[in-house]
Image: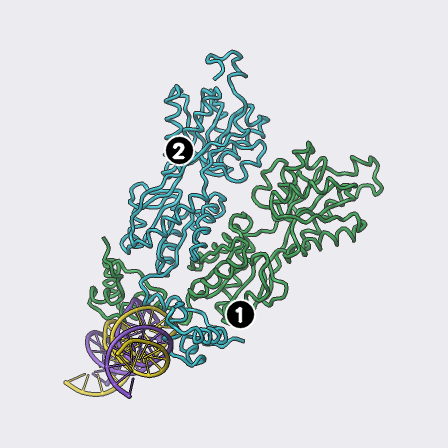
Chain colours: A green, B cyan, C yellow, D purple
Amino acid sequence: MASRAKATIFDIAREAGVSKSTVSLVLQGSGLIRPETAVKVRKAIEDVGYVYNRGAANLRKAHSNVIGMVINDLTNPFFAELAVGMERVFQSAGIVPFIGNTAENPVRQEEVLKSLMEQGVAGLIVSPARGTTPGAFRRLEMAGVPVVFAMRRLPESRIPVIAPDNHRGAYLATAHLIGKGHRRLVFFGGSSDLVVYHERLGGFREACETQGIAARDALVVEGETSRRGGIACLETALAMAEPPTAALCFNDAVAFGAMLALRKRGLEPGADFAIVGFDDVAEAEHYMPALTSVAVDSAGLGERAAHVMLKMIQSRTTRAEDHIGAVNLVVRESCGPDRRTRNRPTGTGGAA
Amino acid sequence: MASRAKATIFDIAREAGVSKSTVSLVLQGSGLIRPETAVKVRKAIEDVGYVYNRGAANLRKAHSNVIGMVINDLTNPFFAELAVGMERVFQSAGIVPFIGNTAENPVRQEEVLKSLMEQGVAGLIVSPARGTTPGAFRRLEMAGVPVVFAMRRLPESRIPVIAPDNHRGAYLATAHLIGKGHRRLVFFGGSSDLVVYHERLGGFREACETQGIAARDALVVEGETSRRGGIACLETALAMAEPPTAALCFNDAVAFGAMLALRKRGLEPGADFAIVGFDDVAEAEHYMPALTSVAVDSAGLGERAAHVMLKMIQSRTTRAEDHIGAVNLVVRESCGPDRRTRNRPTGTGGAA
DNA sequence: GCCTATAAATGGAACGTTCCAATAAATCAA
DNA sequence: TTGATTTATTGGAACGTTCCATTTATAGGC
């Protein structure tokens, strides 16, 4: 069906009766060629079914305009949103980013990074996989390729980071629960190999401290960052001698799991046990009951990351400022009514 | 920090005291070179911080080992699953696929396909965007690049398709509803620019016909294929003079929306109105009530598509058999109890 | 009509790799 | 030893593009 050998600019040149250089100029949209010539060439391009060979071009050109996005888990809508945000700004810049999925696997991540590098990417936006070793990005730094981290960061690294204000988000959510009258709280899910975990847990702890919750009443149950993990966390918490009455969850998936587990025990999320999630994924709003959660605007952070990347490429630098995105607590039904008015009919502080 | 100019095999050759050809052989893992030489070269590769230039290599090599996956909507967990399934088999084949997102936009899709082609991909797995014109893949066919469609197909096209048995899935689900005693049914969501829509709707209609439902009792409400669309569909249906009692939804998102709308009206999904979804996404199982849905095994279809692609590349062909994946109805709570026993205490057929 | 200035088109070298044919070195059979 | 064989290594051409320095065509000024 198709001519076996791929068409090159020479074929176009022959077809249009010009030189290869002229064809090249036309391809680059140079203003140097006469309009009629350009038209003739463009027709020939169509006729021979030409596809541009970017690899060959990059051999001469300083740098490509390919950007790689490395995502740790595409099935998590939270990260998919991030990717979509980035896509949006790249699209309007006429760039098609290539997305690689690492499935939270550092070995796979290494392969993906290597492959992207070999393609000669101009820059890389990465949401690093859990368990990424600090040295994993040394090669990229050596090669002078601009990199930005999105959502997650590595313990010691000079690579710029675009992430939400996890500490503040957790603080706000926890303060809200305490304000509702809860006095024994728990942090559900996540594990300490993630910097994000420490940030969120830190916010939780600080809120407990500054709002007069004793350290022994600020509990922590580690677990998978999934629905399943949330179920397990709740079981653990309720099995305690003195169970908590409210939970801040590492993310929304954990929160959904915890609510599910409550229901299975005949308890009503909100009324019997307060749940707050983190990330505010699209489902949160539609759950029963609707989930109170910390909104981080992942698509917005994606856009931000893309802009930073474009600027880095443009200014040929490998450094940039970190950007910490604002968060806000979206209060819905899962953290229930004010606890003071239920358990202790007369509060101490009055109207506040 | 890094040496500005990128290292090439010549730099490695100089460092290791061998010729560029030897370096090339080592890079390709040829058995021709003496082990000690190979070690020496590999050390040099490390030392100079070399990154392989695949573009240059592809200039000589017959074809690259890059495969592109073009997905119409990454934020839909259903398609994300598909991508993950493909990833899985490519990973074990030592291939890193590049994912491009088209956000259901044919224009963007054109850009993504063009960009992937320019990179010299060896093959393309595509879930085409809604509204893709029939000619959109002509260029690819001309270039002789193997393409397979996953999940979706185009009206008239000779490109091989890997997709679930939509007709049968819809038939099974509809028959189940009819078996439960429903006599006035509706198909919710989707629009006729999608081949999948016709397939599913066809299954619905066939089941109604063969199971003795009058044509005027087999209703159709088109709508967005989202939660929001589902809400709208339900409102429309209940506003009818003679409303249906059960709905087969185009996909799970529509089903979730319909259930939400039922709840808002104080109706209980399952008991008051039966809902069946399509795709069986992970959430379906965890919903309240759990959603009855047609499972299509999208990850499995992804794996299948990847295998077909690998085989096509290997055998240098652009043709392959279609593959229609088995489906099965997962009955949960959202289609409720048997209707006959509720509305007409004495059924006609006895125990069946 | 001639020289100069501008516009348009062109040939050649270079980019970093692979592959082939050729060379050099080592081994073996006699 | 010598020629034949095998094992390792190598130089050169080619891949499809860009970019620079030229060449050729067109127009302008006098």
Mark 2 lies on a secondary structure that is helix
User: Can you give x and y, in whole percent of width and height, for residue A47 in the image?
Assistant: 23, 58
User: Can you give x and y, in whole percent of width and height, for residue A96 in the image?
Assistant: 42, 58
> Which amino acid, mark 2?
Arg
The quadrant holding residue A138 is bottom right
Label 2 marks which chain's residue?
Answer: B
Local crowd size for mark 2, using a 10 Å CA cut-off: few (<14), some (14–19), many (≥20): many
Any part of residue A117 in sight: yes
Identify the disc placed on residue B200.
2
Any part of residue B241 in sight: no
Q: Pick the residue in front: B72 or C10.
A: B72
Mark 1 lies on a secondary structure that is helix
Asked if the residue at tag 1 contacts the one at tag 2, i.e. Cβ–Cβ closer than 8 Å, the answer is no
The quadrant holding residue C27 is bottom left
Total numbered labels placed on residues in the image:
2
Identify the disc placed on residue A141.
1
Distance from Cα at disc 2 to Cα at disc 1: 51 Å
User: Can you give x and y, in whole percent of width and height, for residue A231 in the image?
Assistant: 64, 41
